[in-house]
Image (cartoon, grey):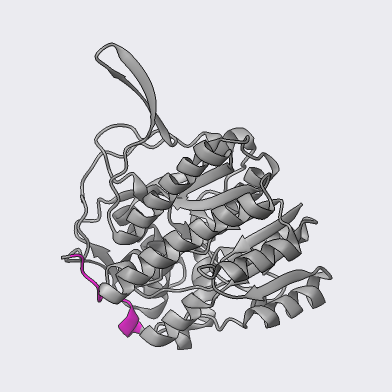
Amino acid sequence: MRVLILGGDGYLGWPTAMHLSARGHEVAVVDNYFRRQACHALNCEPLIPVPNLHQRRRRWEETWGRKIRVDIGDLCDYNFVSRVFREFSPEGVVHYAEQPSAPYSMMDRQAAVFTLTNNLVSTCNLIHAVREFQPQCHIVKLGTMGVYGTPNIDIEEGYLEVEHKGRRHRFLYPKEPGSLYHLTKAQDGDLLFFYCRMWDLRVTDLNQGPVYGMLTPESRTDEGLTSFFNYDAIFGTVLNRFLVQAAAGAPLTVYGEGGQTRGYLDLRDTLACVELTLLHPAEAGQYRVFNQFVETFSVMDLALRVQEAGQELGLSAEIVKIPNPRREAESHYYNPAHTGLLDLGLTPHYLTRAGLVEMLQLVRRHQERIDTSLLMPTVTWR
């Protein structure tokens, strides 16, 4: 099918583009280079240098013999969005184009306003473009498990059946996001749910947990095709940050007591989940929600696993608890459902010591680029 990937330059967007292109889909990517510009402005460059989208596209075509369309522009500009839709006529859209960092969203007023504007206006423009140009198009939006917070009951997959005073109703599961970024992900979900009811859109919201990993089958052939790998405290996810800390001989910094538990998944599983969702689209008028993760770990669990993997390579990684810069429960109940994508055929990759050792080896090949000053948190919620 023809698939438009919004945010196609990002940690998830570019691997998704290659994955779908390699499987015969016609792929176009759109990006405004926000992540590159923010990394440059904050002096937190990724571990491995990343060619720009036009250079990556050329390397992809030379290596795999397949084409990917590239458009650089801002999704908050409806004229730009309209042009892309008219020219490409997508059958599916993967929406990765939101500002992706909780710490960035909590940094200051300017970052907060950008997060709100970018994330909600881009989603609104997408909705209107689908209605105007491709009303049968299936929107696959990257959500986050963070919209749920950590309630003291089981987390269902998007919806909750409620009985109240003898009557029953099915509601969207209550949301209690823990950062402004997570709040915008809850708000764009409500926006899409509203327009599914009003305009019969087809939407799948993938509430994804933190992703780890660097290589996919497509990028193993050419390191120039590797995605962004941020390890800093703004854009780096926790497991990726621990891997870099271990490789650099720095302490593994656990926020607070380390009991914060979340659902995690391998980068390769993100790609598989997105393709499965595209191949099994939502019905007209359906706002479908999948909880997209494979395993749950506490932060301390992850630190211990990285420490053990590092020992195989002769690394002595000390685990250090530091004051938690976030406002979150550090000890809590956490039991989220996640059967929808498994039912569609997902074959998960589990976090193994061998996989951690391989990632550590790749990080060590670029050890000279590690800036240990980026590893400590600089943004606090309070």
Describe residue 374's horizontal placement relative to residue 9 as left or right.
left
What is the x, y in percent for residue 144?
Answer: 42, 51
Magenta span main SS: loop
What is the x, y in percent for residue 306?
Answer: 40, 62
What is the x, y in percent for residue 333?
Answer: 26, 38
Residue at the far top in the pictured view: 166
Residue 32: image quadrant is bottom right
Look at the image and say whether residue 373 sits in the magenta stretch.
Answer: yes
Image height of 191 relative to 63, above or below: above
Front position in the image: 86 or 221:
86
Front position in the image: 168 or 247:
168
Q: Is residue 281 visible?
A: yes
Image height of 48 relative to 193, above or below: below
Describe residue 285's horizontal placement relative to residue 187 as left or right.
right
Residue at the far right in the pictured view: 65
What residue is shown at x 56% (from left), y 41% (from top)? 199
Q: Is residue 272 visible?
A: no
Residue 271: image quadrant is bottom right
Specify the quadrant that holds the C terminus: bottom left
What residue is shown at x 66% (from left), y 74% (from top)? 71
What residue is shown at x 75% (from left), y 74% (from top)? 60
Front position in the image: 15 or 350:
15
Number of numbered tags placed on the structure image: 0
What is the x, y in percent for residue 10?
Answer: 54, 69
* Stretch in magenta: 372-381
Front position in the image: 5 or 315:
5
What residue is shown at x 55% (from left), y 43% (from top)? 204
Look at the image and say whether residue 170 sits in the magenta stretch.
Answer: no
